[in-house]
Image (cartoon, rainbow, N blue to C red):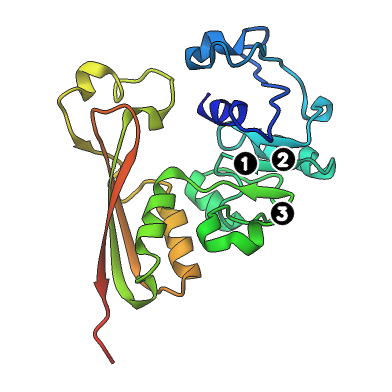
Amino acid sequence: GELMRLLLNHSSADVVTATSRKLDGTPVASVHPHLRGLTDLVFRNIEADDIDADFVFLAVPHTAAMKIAGTLAERGIKTVDLSADYRLAKDVYEKTYGVHHEAYFEAPYGLVELHRDEVRGASFVANPGCFPTGATLAAAPLAHLAHTIIYDSKTGVTGAGNSPSATTHYPNVGDNFSAYKWTTHRHLAEMKQEAARLGSTARCYFTPHLLPVNRGILTTAHILLREPM
């Protein structure tokens, strides 16, 4: 919904299709009320072979993108994948997400502040995860001098998506502040990957915390430097 808001207000973009299996036939604005008056689009359940567009954003869960990405790439449709399916090397992805990657190919990691040359002109780009974006940019200037990097992140509730759960239920979140997935969050793999690309051999640690706010992430990177030579 937020991506569509940005595109609908962009002078060079024309949003032609919004796809969904579950919401087929439902007006987009009835699902995303903030888009009322901006679009009359209706969600359509169509296959990747039938998409008629110059550019596609894949806003699907991990493991779902890999079932579509190959078709879009073969058709030459420029694509940004918002899922995790192409952010990591194949072996790291399979270990991190516990699934076999059935349609792997290499794609540039879309953190343009660090990989602008790789992203420019690419036909398929892996959009970085939310936590790794702020964490990596915070640590980038000193990563090559670090022996340990500790990422401490606070996030709003909307990052969990719109599926109800006990974790995001308001009585459990309101006036509360809690850490979760200590040292095991999947985004740590991206943080380690990007630190290595910055020339760092540092050990990386990451703990996310859930704040009782709607949106946004605040990350503090604690960078312990190596002793001077």
Per the image, the residue denoted by label 2 is 69
Q: Position of residue 94 (x, y in %)?
A: 56, 50
Q: Secondary structure at mark 1?
A: strand
Comparing marks 2 and 1, which lies closer to the viewer?
1
Comparing marks 3 and 2, which lies closer to the viewer?
3
The residue shown at (33%, 41%) is: 217
Left or right: 87 in relation to 41 = left
Left or right: 153 in relation to 42 = left
Per the image, the residue denoted by label 1 is 81
Q: Residues within 10 Å of mark 3 (few under 14, many from 20)?
A: some
Per the image, the residue denoted by label 3 is 122
Say if 127 sits above or below 216 in the image.
Answer: below
Q: Position of residue 177 (x, y in %)?
A: 18, 34
Q: Nearer the viewer, residue 40 or 165?
A: 40
Q: Position of residue 61 (x, y in %)?
A: 55, 32
The residue shown at (49%, 12%) is: 33
